[in-house]
Image: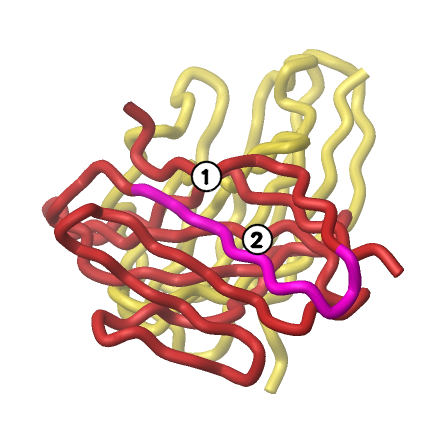
Amino acid sequence: EAGVVQSPRYKIIEKKQPVAFWCNPISGHNTLYWYRQNLGQGPELLIRYENEEAVDDSQLPKDRFSAERLKGVDSTLKIQPAELGDSAVYLCASSLGGVGPCTFGSGTRLTVV
Amino acid sequence: RKEVEQDPGPFNVPEGATVAFNCTYSNSASQSFFWYRQDCRKEPKLLMSVYSSGNEDGRFTAQLNRASQYISLLIRDSKLSDSATYLCVVNVRAGSYQLTFGKGTKLSVIP
């Protein structure tokens, strides 16, 4: 069974440029998460979807970040414009329902220069 | 008080040693608990769930103390391959479920 697939693996952009990340969750997993992880820190939740509905986006910086999960399957996370402080690893995860553990993708390492 | 707190370490232990990590959580409504392992520059991977009665998986033992709101992970007979960061994870039902990660505890097993 394929795991959570993310792309790209690495992205280097100049500040003020837009960037987008893509995630395809495990088949059948209705819950999808986007986390951001800074060096030496644990993953921090940005947004959580139940099917196509964003049920928790309280930590998403809405002035520059947006996300969508059309059709309740794959998802994209966008930053526009990117800032230097956005450099981090962006992890997508999915689970079957919200009560159990989640499975992570390999992440997108973003560097903003 | 942070929602999930862990000692960041590092814990440097010799091979064969027993090592224990603790994690405390602030929300008494927390419903499920997990330990994840994260290798350097890799994604976190589920190590084990933590059950109220305590549970064991080979050399790993997890325990939960709801009254004191802490979770522990015990690793016996440490191997070099156990070197990683161990993340404590708590799932809280507050409207919807919120899966919250600690910052992780770094373990280095030394030959």
The image quarter in which residue A17 lies: top right
Chain A colour in the picture: yellow
Measured as percent of width and height from the top left, residue A88 is found at 66, 31
Q: Disc 1 designates what residue? A: B6
User: Is residue A63 left or right of B30 when viewed as pictured?
Assistant: right
Q: Disc 2 designates what residue? A: B86
Q: Locate the C terminus of chain A and report the quarter of the image it occupies.
A: top right
Instruction: Say which amino acid is labelled 2.
Output: Tyr
Instruction: Say which amino acid is labelled 1.
Output: Gln
Q: Are marks 1 and 2 in contact (CB under 8 Å)?
A: yes
Residue that sits furthest to the right in the current view: B111
User: Is residue B78 left or right of B22 when viewed as pictured?
Assistant: right
Label 1, label 2: how many angstroms apart (C-alpha)? Answer: 9 Å
Q: Which element is circle 1 on?
A: strand
Measured as percent of width and height from the top left, residue A30 is found at 34, 69
Q: Residue at x 57, y 53 (%)?
A: B86
Most frequent secondary structure within the magenta stretch? strand
Q: Residue at x 48, y 27 (%)?
A: A65
Q: Which element is circle 2 on?
A: strand
Chain B colour in the picture: red
Q: Relative to B94, is A84 above or below?
A: above
Magenta residues, start to end = B14-24
